Amino acid sequence: MNNVVLRFAKGDFSRKVKIATKDEIGQLGHSVNYMAKELESIEQMRRDFVANVSHDLRSPLTSIKGFLVAFIDGTIPEQKKSRYLSIMKSETERLIKLVNDLLDITKLESAELTINPTSYNISEQLRLVIAKMEPELSKFEIEVELDEEEDYFVFADSDRIEQVFINLLQNAIHFSTRQQVIYIKMKKVENMLSVSIKDEGKGINEENLKKIWDRFYKVDQSRTNNLGTGIGLSIVKQIIDLHQTEIEVTSELGKGTTFTFKLQLSGE
Ligand SMILES: Nc1ncnc2c1ncn2[C@@H]1O[C@H](COP(=O)(O)OP(=O)(O)O)[C@@H](O)[C@H]1O
Ligand SMILES: [Mg+2]
């Protein structure tokens, strides 16, 4: 057992502890093997993470550099310049989004991160977020319909909740098609506020629905037509966890998706 454990310590999980007895030593052997399996999967996730991030950073940089070289060499015809510049702009935006997501996730993972809840008007916040996203909404001709009986006040970390709204709304826009509507509903359920964001977009099948919270998971893995990083929902989940509440998702392929989360209501 000793030799195998020393190999585990060096990151070699190819061998398992042999279990010969049913006593306490045998039990320990089982536990050690279990620990090794868990460590191996964490190690694999770490490797995938680095590989994914490196790829996601390299591909836009390579494309931006290619365009820059062509601009410097003067090989780009005048009428194509503005199109290439706008590709460079969107590639840069993609890099910024990735780096921001990574910074968020690192912050959220460090044990020091605590949320800073205050009592605030979440209805007001939501109207502002929607206003900020207006350029994106009108670009895709998507409308947002807000349904609430009154202004609600919650006890939560407003910066973090803004991030939850932005991530969920960006997904709703991204996975909808032109002229569809996003419905947002806020209502009291017992002593909590329930917020649901519903789109009429492409939906997610049952199997993928379980995986969407995983870091880097995207249903459509192809990198060409999906500018996402697969990080957004894992950030949402962590923020909701920090608020010690829950987020649920229901979806039907081709019909749309609804995310619902609850927050602590507060007095004004
Ligand atoms: N509203 C939605 N409609 C359909 N699919 C969605 C929706 N929100 C998330 N998904 C799926 O979950 C995946 C993970 O979402 P997310 O973590 O935000 O990553 P990203 O948006 O960067 O791809 C998306 O790639 C998509 O496949
Ligand atoms: Mg997203």
Image (tube, rainbow, N blue to C red):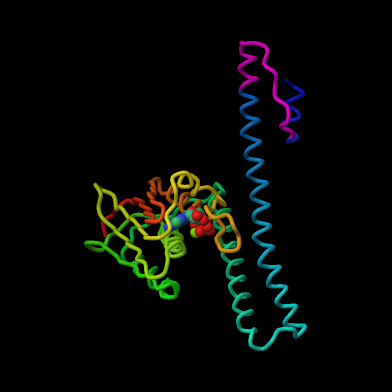
Task: Please provide percent x and percent y for residue 130.
Answer: 38, 69
Q: Residue at the spot x=54%, y=57% of the render?
A: 104
> Can I make out residue 232 in this image?
no
State left or right for residue 213 relative to residue 249: right
Whether 150 is drawn above or below 64: the answer is: above
Quarter of the image for the N terminus: give it: top right
Q: Up-down: is 149 above or below 80?
A: above
Q: From this viewpoint, is residue 14 visible? A: yes
Which span is picked out in magenta?
12-30
Main SS category, magenta section: loop
Residue 29 magenta: yes
Among the 4 quarters of the image, the one containing residue 3: top right
Instruction: Give the residue furthest to the bottom.
Output: 78
Q: Position of residue 263 (x, y in %)?
A: 34, 52
Residue at the front extreme, as displayed:
254
The C terminus - image quarter: bottom left
Q: In this orientation, which residue lies closer to the viewer: 157 or 12?
A: 12
Q: Residue furthest left?
A: 149
Residue 196 drawn in magenta: no
Q: How many marks?
A: 0
- Residue at x-position 44% and y-position 48%: 205
Q: Quadrant of residue 124?
A: bottom left
- The residue lying toward the viewer, choosing from 198 and 263, is 198
Q: Quadrant of residue 20?
A: top right
Residue at 73% across, 36% down: 11
Residue 215: x and y in percent read 55, 50
Q: Position of residue 267 (x, y in %)?
A: 26, 56
